[in-house]
Image: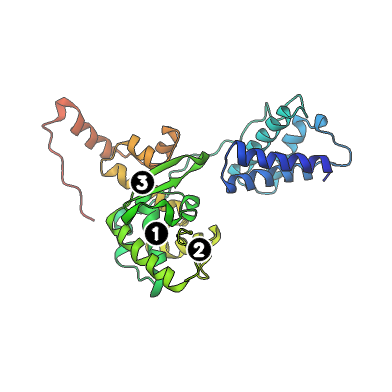
Amino acid sequence: MRAELEESLGRFEAYLRYERRYSEHTVAAYVTDVREFLSSLPMGEVEFSALSRGDVAEWMSSRIAQGCKQTTVNRGLSALRYYFRFLRREGLVVDDPTYHAQSLRVPKRLPTVLTEKETAHLFDQVVYPEGWQGQRDRLILLLLYTLGVRRSELLTLTWGDFSSGYREVRVLGKGRKERLLPVLPEASELLSSYRAAVYGEFTALPRDGHVILDDQGQPMKVARLYRLVRDYLGQVTTQSYRGPHVLRHSFATHMLEEGADILTIKRLLGHSSLRSTQVYTHVDASLLRKEYQQAHPHAQGAQLGERPKE
């Protein structure tokens, strides 16, 4: 890759990290996408000003031909849009070749969730390993489900983020936005016993270090978290997708089903848009009917049936 383009990519990475304040995961994905786009061009002759809409369209077509998912192709286009926006600001290009590029249509999918029975099974019947690792595994699942945090938010939690007695936790979300979440008593008790076990096992750990550790006492990586959660969820559900986000989806869905206001759920999830929260939740006919009967003045006398037992 030409030195000029490589240098621009380095500055672009800094722009995403320090000005846009995107997560490390997003920064890495965007930089990788732009690098792949630049690598697909005849770098011996191409100048910034020569990059065209045709180059963008051809790259998108090649990714489709390679079997990339629609969401992956769209993420690549989003990365290029930010890259050319950055180049225009730097005065390196005048025209944006992504201006008329169209994202691929992605079919809407309902998020994967556990039933309340499956969730109860996960915490009441699954057998966890002995020792601090078993406490850690249960804590991971419990925090994902009771806080509704993203995987990156969980893995970056430190002991200093928790209040005295582990009653509240400060979570740093997307765009470096902070939110304060309540911690349930069950999780508070487990945090206390887990911390004692961890510091008994690894005496040299910093006092306010990362909460979620791998078996060697190092901050856990995303890939390890995925494997761990997938293995445990496989014991309670047959659904094909069993990543950490299933518990975040389940948190939002179960809160909604129990009558929580959608704006409250939005704040707890750390969403900037209500539309994002609506994607995470399911509103079925029975819930709508229940809300109607509770809220409409002419329906106050209506009899609500008992919730069906599973």
Secondary structure at numbered mark 2:
helix
Count neighbours of disc 3 (C-alpha within 10 A) and say few if under 14, some if 14 to 19, many if 20 or more: some
Real-space Cα distance between discs 2 and 1? 12 Å
Residue in front for this viewpoint, 219 or 101? 219
Q: Residue 227 — which label?
A: 2
- Along the horizontal axis of the image, is 144 left or right of 31? left
Q: How many marks?
A: 3
User: In the rendering, at what x and y percent does residue 157 appear?
Assistant: 46, 54
First reached walking from the N terminus: tag 3 or tag 1: 1
Q: Residue 167 — which label?
A: none
User: In the rendering, at what x and y percent does residue 264 appear?
Assistant: 33, 37
What residue is shown with label 3?
Answer: 181
What amino acid is labelled 3 in the image?
Leu
Real-space Cα distance between discs 2 and 3? 26 Å
What residue is shown with label 1?
Answer: 141
Please tell me in which quadrant of the rendered image residue 26 appears. top right
What amino acid is labelled 2 in the image?
Arg
Looking at this view, name the residue that lies furthest to the right: 45
Secondary structure at numbered mark 3:
strand
User: In the rendering, at what x and y percent does residue 181 appear?
Assistant: 36, 46
How is the model colour-coded?
rainbow
Count neighbours of disc 1 (C-alpha within 10 A) and say few if under 14, some if 14 to 19, many if 20 or more: some
Q: Nearer the viewer, mark 2 or mark 3?
A: 3
Residue in the picture at 47% in, 57% down? 240
Real-space Cα distance between discs 3 and 1? 16 Å
User: In the rendering, at what x and y percent does residue 71 appear?
Assistant: 58, 43
